[in-house]
Amino acid sequence: MNYIEIKDVVKRYSGHTALNGVSMSVPKGCIYGLLGPNGAGKTSLIRIINRITHQDSGEVLLDGRPIVDDDVTRIGYLPEERGLYKKMKVLDQIVYLARLKGMPRSIAYSEAMAWLERFNLTEWAGKKLETLSKGMQQKVQFIATVIHRPQLLIFDEPFSGFDPVNAEQLKQEILRLNKEGATILFSTHNMESVEAVCEQISLINHSQVVLQGNVNEIRRSHKKNIIAVALEGDAKLPERPELYSILPAQDSTQETMVKLQQGVNVREAIAWLNDNCPLTGFHEILPSMHEIFIDTVNNTKTSQNEEA
Amino acid sequence: MKKLKLIIAREYKAMVMSKSFILTTMLMPLLIVVCGGVPALIGYLNDAGSDVEKVAIIDESGRYGAAVTDTELYQFVALKGDTASATNAREFYDKSSGDLAAVVVIPAAVDQGAPVTVYSESTVNISLKDHINRELSDTITRAKLASYGIEGLQEMIDNSTVDVDVKSVKWSNDGSENESSTEIAMVLGMVLSLFTYMFVLMYGAMIMNGVVEEKTNRIVEVIVSSCKPFQLMMGKILGIGLVGLTQIAVWTVLVSIVMGVCGSIAGVGFGIMGDNSVMLGGAAQQAAASVDEDTMASIMRSLFSVNYAAILSCFVLYFLGGYLLYASLFAACGSAVDQASDAGQFTSPLMFIMIIALYAGMACIDNPSGPMATACSMIPFTSPVVMMIRLPYDVPFWQILVSLLLLYATAAGTVWVASRIYRTGILLYGKKHGFKDLFKWVKG
């Protein structure tokens, strides 16, 4: 069951096309990564899901039916460029934003207090926002995003502006919300976090989806047949050009990277190594999302240049 | 609707609770009272604090010296003419060892037009000169009239001096007569017109700054993911408009209280003014002197003859219409820029129109029913200011109706245009935009 279904969405601004036939399915309860370089169209897509702007053509379905304005109460959105009213008190601010999302005042109030306590901000509830540190302001912003228990959470670069400790706390909160049933749409450049938390991704480049699917499957399908081999002691890996080529050492680890020749399968190579070297261990190296991201973006660039 | 209410409430609360609002609301009337009252008070203290000064009179004419009577400030001492003359005035002054403030010499030929001279080491106070001038002129005029030996001449002259008082009376439809005052209508119109002008500019700027603040704070994207940009814009405009009405209400109450208090102690007030007008010179003195009980009563009657309820409700209607019209445009200006300091290129045409409206209004004071005034009170961009000038002069009802309809229709139009600019502008950062972009956004 897909919670969001985006079908062939096109959005044009005067002069350029921000989204050109984008389709995407986000299963219910999934943590979904929306990736892409700056200006690719991620924010345009997120704004359409949030009903801030409207698509020129195509469909956006939420929970199986076309999305309507009232659905925004079921969405929590943390934009990349975010802020709050500096002169407003922390608690008032959270309650105000919660009520804008349709929460009754008394519930918004008690929920806000509970969240402030969870983030150790209780004593700041009556203070003006401008008196808080930047990290605390970010936490207040996070509370304001999730307080109305949205079924869909959209985070645009959620970890920017957080120190590692707070970023970890934030990540745990996001995972907890996901466990409680929220579907999460992540927009980020931070590829490590994508590998760590996202089950599925869409990579958008130049207004189009260029890569889509399950993270593990994508990594496997992009594998370059590289395995890391560890040998006993100072033993050196013999050259076997017909089986593999040895890649130049990148760091001081004991492992040696070898790239298998085309047509050679892993089992074959390992069998030979096992027979001929003091093999202590091996594992296949899957490309990181970071590499796949850069490769894919560069590939689309070159193919576009060729077209032009 | 619920969201709009929430936004209005937030804007209202944020503004009304701010220190600057509380200060201006409470202090503005005080400031006006202080501005008006301080000069009078200073003059009063100035007079009250000083000692009575002695002034010597050398009366060479031998007849008119006694005519100059003592005042609260000056005591006049006559010096006998056989020992004293203009030539030895200095001796008397020196001999007095600082006891004398001045020496007045009345020449023998004073009734032939010879000037009276006041000698002093310091600059002669203008109120002293005025006092001597008045008392001597009166006495000498009387003496001259008496010298003709015509019986009852004084009475004849008094009777033939006529000061024509022009009183305006307004006929109302029910046949009753109301004493009206053109001056009061004029002042009232000017005050209301300036008020509208000031308020629209002040609150327009507030709206614009609010919009720019939300944009630079980057809260705007958070808010519009919960409500429509139109709701956010209207919420701000209406919320701050309510703040304006609150301010008007508070000021109306304060002014009514002050007027009530002033009315009950009017006598005392005018007494003080009468005293002080000495320092304003002879003309004011005479004016103050002529404010007798009759004219006071007529001023009060005229003040109360004005239909405040009708004017105030018209004022509120025009104020709201003009406010909506300009505030929405100011909001659009704010949405198109990243910082308030960049907004000048968009706001200057608005300011220009407002200033034209003000000048048109001031020009209409002389002829509030003329074609120019009528036209400007119909054009929506100038009508809120110009109609204020005309209101106290009983504008035909149909004109008010048409002008209000035009104003509100145009305001609805500017709100629509502004909302188109706003919803695009608030989400665009970084690039500077021109009028061309705004037109593009309006077209969608």
Image (tube, coloured by chain):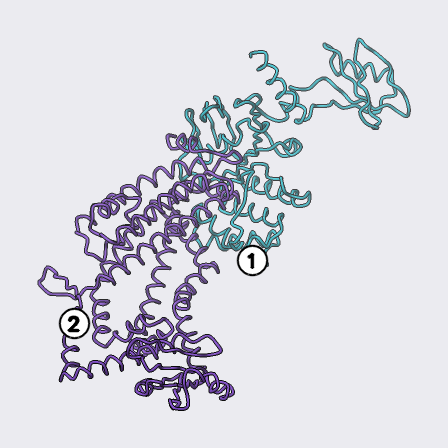
Q: Is residue B133 above or below residue A130?
A: below
> In which chain is the residue bearing label 1?
A
The percent position of residue B186, horizontal first and vertical second, equals: 26, 59
Which residue is painted at 26% across and 45% down in the image?
B376
In the image, A45 versus B117, the foreground residue is B117
Q: Which chain is cyan?
A: A
The percent position of residue A236, horizontal first and vertical second, equals: 89, 19
Few, some or many residues within 10 Å of mark 1 (<14, 14–19, 20+): some
How many circles with numbers are drawn on the protein?
Answer: 2
Which residue is painted at 25% across and 55% down in the image?
B314
Few, some or many residues within 10 Å of mark 2 (<14, 14–19, 20+): few
Q: Is residue A257 above or below residue B273?
A: above
Q: Is residue A108 above or below residue B29?
A: above
Q: Is residue B410 left or right of residue A195?
A: left
Q: Is residue B150 left or right of residue B403?
A: left
Helix, strand or loop under label 1: loop
Q: Amino acid at mark 2?
A: Val
> In which chain is the residue bearing label 2?
B
- Residue under circle 2? B162
Q: Please state, as top left, top right, bottom left or bottom right, where the C terminus of chain A lies in the image.
A: top right
Give the CA distance from mark 1 to mark 2: 74 Å
Helix, strand or loop under label 2: loop
Q: Chain B's shade in the image?
A: purple
- Residue under circle 1? A127
